[in-house]
Image (spheres, helix red, strand yellow):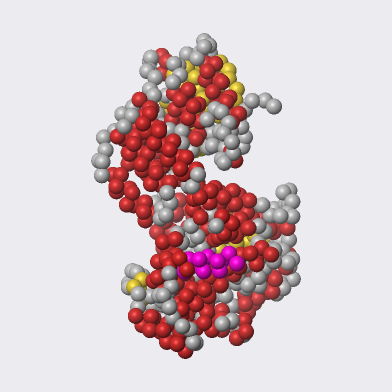
Amino acid sequence: MSSPVSYRLEGNIGVIAVNNPPVNALSQPVRQGILDAITRAQGDESAAVLIICEGRTFIAGADITEFGKPFKSPWLPELLAAIEASSKLVVAAIHGTALGGGFETALAAHYRCAVPAAKIGLPEVKLGLLPGAGGTQRTPRLAGVRASLDLITGGVPISAPQGEKLGLIDKIVEGDLQAAALAWISELLANETAIRRSSEQAVPEFDPAIFDEYRSQLLKRARGQVAPGYIVDCIEAAASGSFDEGMAVEREAFTACMESPQSAGMRHIFFAERQAAKVEGLAKDTPKRSVQSVGVIGGGTMGGGIAMCFANAGITVTMIEISDEALQRGLAIVDGNYAGSVKRGKLSEEKARSCRGLISGSTDYAALADVDMVVEAVFEDPGLKKKIFKQLDAICKPGAILATNTSYQDVDVIAAATNRPADVIGTHFFSPAHIMKLLEVVRGEKTADDVLATVMSLAKTIRKVPVVSGVCYGFIGNRMLRPYGKTAQLLLLEGASPQQIDTAMEAWGMAMGPLRVFDLAGLDVGYKARQALSDEKKGDPKTYRVADLLVELGRMGQKSGAGFYAYDDNRKPTPDTAVDKLIETVADDLGVARRKITDEEIVDRLISALVDEGRKILDEGIAQRSSDIDVVYVYGYGFPVSRGGPMFYADQN
């Protein structure tokens, strides 16, 4: 097998070229190859060394498949020390992405150039880790303390031009990267530019109070995660001591993170997300249908968000509403969302304007005659959905994909309203649809393979994380939410207050406690769904009586100003004694003895409810694999990524 690293002379410049597709990951053979090449360069006739990568990217990171396996020399800090110690000038030339260990490699070079489209970053925090090969030590010496804290605790890559402003990139080059890099090195040599080692630079002046400031921020922003705190410690060590002292702190912190259950959980989700994209029994070469235009039926909050998902990916969208007034209201929602994205810095004004220009509207279903796909996003009314799909069957062109955004309804029943059930599929977006990453792709009994393959691929195009589900009431996520919610209702009657339940779950790591979630979604949604069920299917009144009475009192959640909590104009929740009294009355009526309940019991019972239902979903074949359920709950329901999802958590505890 040929080496993934080559070395050659281009005039008086030694060129180290990495070719380890698809992303030039820093596997052991790559590390060894670079070390051998840099060592060789010290004794040959080269005057300088260029590190460059073939293919579509620079080194995009470590080979995380090696994590948890026996160590194989050389380790990355050893390699980077050799690069930095080179007696000959070393330049890294970056294209694509230089992330994690890849960017640490670039930082060990004496100078860095990049094409304008390149991105750089240290995203290890997203795996519950921190840069372990000097990233926390070299970065602040070049970019300063605040920029390093932002870059490394946030884990979000930045553009090469941004990196240049921070001092992390020395030159932006145009045209052919290798030719431009070689020309720049020749210029550096002609000017007798001195070797500049990052480790020998002084950290720019900073305010010592910045470290406590960031620790305080991270307690809220990265609740419960240990890696961000360690990152602050490491950067503080870089700012207050020698490079070698800082490296010792970084190594100890990296080891602690690597051995933590949090990193194990986050690495599990990293792999689980990629595994979820693979559909069992679906051939890799399954053809895909072209989707260049999409219709969205329904201009509400969900429909508007879905329209934006497609428009943001460059796909034209036609929004359908029942009246001009409703249509204008729906388009106004889209306008407001785009304005918000610009204000938050998520989109430039130019990009927002371009995307918004792809969305048009109509009150006539005939406008959907030539679209490649339709996503129905109306109320959870099975009769209305079947009526819409019957209309679509008559209007849409042959081969158009017909998707329903239902959260609960039977996709097979909806498909049966058409003469083309093979073209029908479920696409369960999560609100707000233009922000939430999860997409449950519901495969009906008769859904064609090419339809499923197309939607799974399209999900990536619109920047969603797709998970395949079979057909059942609530699919994966909402089906598991039912016993979770029922358990929360039982805990209320047995003695826990709404705020105790929510606080316990949020302290454990959930993004939002269950009762706050129900208030956010609207208590009337579950109420209406229960009204369509028989008493037998509704189950034990203890699991829904309080919620039903709140709705009947006009307390539907945030949108009505009151639910399990009272809400001010800013939708800030406040405990309400009227709700406490209602709970006590219902408990007395239903014969439930109230007692003191601990936070530990709350967490154990609620998580057990999720896990037990998840196991049933697996047994029934609704989910393809246990890790798919974890992806659903991390990306769709605010389950803490540091715990790896409910099924992973249960397996570890």
Relative to 300, say whether 645 is above or below: above
Q: Position of residue 207 (x, y in %)?
A: 25, 40
- The residue drawn where x is 39% and y is 51% is 345
Q: In terms of depth relative to the viewer, which is nearer, 199 or 66?
A: 66
Q: Position of residue 111 (x, y in %)?
A: 42, 25
Q: In terms of depth relative to the viewer, which is nearer, 510 or 103?
A: 510
In the rendered image, is residue 66 in sight? Answer: yes
Q: Quadrant of residue 138?
A: top left
Relative to 606, say whether 537 is above or below: below
Quadrant containing the C terminus is bottom right
Q: Is residue 610 magenta?
A: yes
- The residue drawn where x is 35% and y is 25% is 200
- The residue drawn where x is 39% and y is 19% is 195
Magenta span: predominant SS is helix
Q: In terms of depth relative to the viewer, which is nearer, 366 or 98?
A: 98
In the rendered image, is residue 15 in sight? Answer: no
Quadrant containing the N terminus is top right
- The residue drawn where x is 49% and y is 27% is 78
Q: Position of residue 119 (x, y in %)?
A: 47, 38
Q: Position of residue 449 (x, y in %)?
A: 73, 58
Q: Residue furthest bottom?
A: 589
Relative to 445, say whether 345 is above or below: above
Q: Quadrant of residue 616?
A: bottom right
Q: Is residue 542 magenta?
A: no
User: Which range of residues does the magenta coloring cover?
Assistant: 602-612
Q: How many marks?
A: 0
Residue 545 placement, left or right of 613: left
Q: Residue furthest top?
A: 45
Q: Quadrant of residue 416?
A: bottom right
